[in-house]
Image: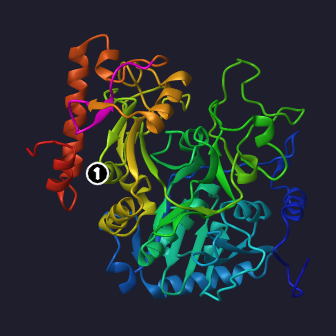
Amino acid sequence: MKTDGSSRFDDLTLAQLVEHALALGEGQLSAKGALVVSTERNTDIQRFIVNEPSVSDVIRADAQFHLLDSGVFKSIWERVKDDVVERDRYRIHAHMGVDADIAVPLEITTLSAWHAISCHHLCHIPTEFNPREKPEWKLIWAPIASFGDAEILSDGGGVILIHVGKRRILMGGDLTTGEMRRTLLTLLGLLLPEKDTLPLHGAAAQGDGEITLFLGPAGTQKTTWALRCGQLIGDRGLSWSNEGLHRLADGCRLHLDHNLPISLDEALRFGTIAENLALGNDREPLLADPDTDSEIHTPTHLVVPLTRLNATQESDTRGPSQLVILTTDPLGVLPPLAKITREQCLAWFILGYGNHLGPLEERQAEIDIRFTPGFMDTLLPRNLDDYVFILEDLLEAHDTRCFLVNAGWHGGQAGKGDPLSASEESAVITGMYYCTDWEPFGSLGLSVPAGQSETAGPWHPKDRWPESSDYTTNESRLIQAIRDELQRTNDPERWLKALEIECN
């Protein structure tokens, strides 16, 4: 409904927004009711943050932001706002966070109805907006043409600008919902540490009296692992403080692959956004090329409400009692399951070790080692120590047990080894909950379950390799890569000692 005589639509329901999106030709409905839209995954995203003391004093030297003059931001903001006000637009009042005490209130304006739909899932739509009367953030998501001939756009592609002091964000271009989520988490990465709260890109579940939190890089199947442990508390957007774990959004964004933690029919029901999903003439998902019968490899993502998954109604909980660092080790030398100390957990959090693509992402496997500190990269714009010190205190306060799980390759490096089987993944979960007999792994300060599982392969990865010498070579490669990465931190001696690695 129009609220002020202009073309502004405030806080429409999901059903109303879908109706608008279809009328505007923004997408089409699949046979099950999901809204299918086309996006261009633009890798040329320019990120700017206004240079002011609140930013320059805390931002990481290697953060992937260009510093921007406040006057330049102001002129661009006014230009975009003036352009947007002349167009049909959608305004959503949302919280980033379900608990009103910790939530960041957002006023989001988009020119596309489907962008507004994504905000319903990537944020929380409260029954009462901003009851604590906190300062509100304003976000505008507009076409790149709305930015005019701004000099900062010389490289083309998408653009994101953040002004912390004015609490304003501009997003420009044909961006994916992943960029919206990334931008919102970047905002929380700036704000939450000031409240001794840690923003997390992970998944958490409760079951058997335990709260288990999974952290890891892309491709480690965090959601799937969490669902094996019970009811999902939150996914991809979480915060952790002395009060416990808090869910930040009403939905999540999932990569569509054969390991999707939900049936495709259930996932594609009305209310879901499917990005770049191919449809046949019957509007059923087309997952293979009918001419070649080969799989279609266009990256497809689903934005779904958490109610579709086995999620709890509660948005916060105590704990966690267990923290699991997931890694996709392309060298195939890390064990399926290892118990680690809290100090070692901090070191693995700093490393964010994994491969560019996980073993279940249905692409040609190759070694492409990535270190993503905190598993969030640009989403943690402050100095890394700000997050590490909070995590250190939280692990101690909640008496959290820590584990390392290799969701990558076993019995060989990427392209030769294999991911864990379903029975081995079950054995890993059982080991986390019930194993009481651990033995030294032999390197990196790890401990693995003693003995042999009845349903899984050897706990020591060396016993899985055909040639032990090949394993030893790759183990040395991993240790050297970790040594080089930790040497770049502020306290390399501490973290190398935690992983029992000698300094060069």
Nearer to the camera, 150 or 60: 60
* The quadrant where residue 78 appears: bottom right
Q: Residue at x 21, y 23 (%)?
A: 473
Residue 452 forms part of the magenta stretch? yes
**Dot 1 alpha-carbon crowd within 10 angstroms: few under 14, some 14 to 19, many 20 or more:** many
Q: Residue at point 31% right, 43% down?
A: 340
Any part of residue 305 in sight: no
Q: How many marks?
A: 1
Residue 200's x, y, as percent? Answer: 48, 59
> Left of 153 or right of it: where is 55?
left
Q: Which residue is mark 1?
A: 347
Front residue (pair 77, 251): 251
Q: Could you tell me residue 140's position as x and y percent?
A: 65, 75
- Quarter-of-image position of residue 328: top left
Image spot of residue 490 (x, y percent): 20, 62
Figure colour scheme: rainbow
Q: Taking 304 as reference, is 321 left or right?
A: left
The amino acid type, in three-letter code, at marker 1 is Ala
Residue at image position (70%, 45%) is 310
Q: Would you place residue 490 above or below residue 252 in this image?
A: below
Looking at the rendered structure, the secondary structure element under dot 1 is helix
Quarter-wise, where is residue 120 in the image? bottom right
- Can the viewer see residue 199 in this picture? yes
Residue drawn 81% across the image and 53% down it: 271
Residue 218 in the image, given as x and y percentages of width and height = 49, 44
- Quarter containing the C terminus: top left
Q: Closer to the camera, 226 or 244?
A: 244
Q: Please name the predominant secondary structure of the magenta segment in the image.
A: loop
The residue sitting at the left extreme is 504
Quadrant position of the N terminus in the picture: bottom right
The residue segment tinted magenta is 440-453
As for residue 371 lying within the magenta part, the answer is no
